[in-house]
Image (cartoon, grey):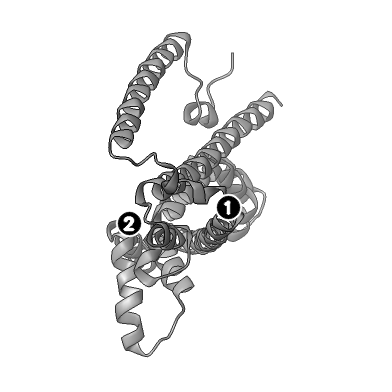
Amino acid sequence: MRAPSIRDRLYEAPGPKTRRRVAAFTVVALLGLGFLLYLVVRQFARQGQLEARYWDFFLKWSTWRYLGMGLLSTLRSALTAAVIAIALGFVLMRGKLRRNPIARWIATAVIEFTRGVPTLLLIYFFFLVVPRMGLSIGAFWRVTLPCAISASGIIAEAFRAGVNAVPKGQTEAALSLGLSNTRTFYQVVFPQAIRFVIPSLISELVIVLKDTTFAYVVSYADLMQNAKVLITSHDSLVSVYLVVAVIYILINYGLNKLSDRAARGLKRTGAAADAK
């Protein structure tokens, strides 16, 4: 019987007892959510929020087109922020793993700063302070850059955890074959580390997507901003926010399922590699 690998420890499947416990908690949670939903719907009915005038504009194509335009802007900002955050996180990770104490201290300070400062505060900085420095940036970057900076520290730590999870024997074997430290990292260590952190990167994209909801601060025409316009036009706050909430839930659910599938795929790949 082979010893459990790092992948097994990271993505260990639950046993029968744990599965039964999870199933029981799931049933209880669903019943509780169902009862809560019933109370909410009943309260909406009592307040007249289920009247047709609050919902009939969703039957128009123009409404969904307008929301779709906002959703595309949200996704564009979130994906751009994710790409920048991954690149910046990689640079910070490399800095923190350096032997040079100055580079390591700078990278650590930046990581702790980005992890500790709220995204909304960074958005206000780009919205209020940066223009006073003589730098003019559009609403898109006033949202995207703060979200990217905020996520970069978390991604840097995820990268570092993945690198540390690679067995030291891999590095020693590569160095014994004559590879330099740089080639060992990029050709041996990091390709294995990235497979460990893919689920974490996908999960971080969910957080970045949520952070883009602060776009209202800079009047960026994202999904939430367009939803506010619909609320003003149709005087239907509850119905619009409910629909927007469902959209966000579906997107985040899809990303979480993608993360779970990536984790299972990595586990199967690791098991196949260990079998060889």
Q: Which residue is mark 1?
A: 60
Q: Residue at the far right: name it.
A: 276
**Front residue (pair 111, 48):** 48
**Where's the N terminus, which quadrant?**
top right
- SS for dot 2: helix
Identified by mark 2, the residue type is: Arg
- Residue at 57% over, 53% down: 64
Q: Is residue 142 above or below residue 244?
A: below
Q: Which mark is residue 115?
A: 2
Identified by mark 1, the residue type is: Lys
**Front residue (pair 251, 231):** 231
**Where's the C terminus, which quadrant?**
top right
- SS for dot 1: loop
Q: Is residue 171 above or below residue 215?
A: above
Q: Residue at the far bottom: name it.
A: 134
Q: Is residue 133 visible?
A: yes
Q: Is residue 79 above or below residue 19?
A: below
In the image, 201: left or right of 154? Answer: right
User: How would you rate the neighbour count of disc 1 (Cα within 10 Å): few for under 14, some for 14-19, many for 20 or more?
Assistant: few
- Residue at 48% over, 58% down: 223
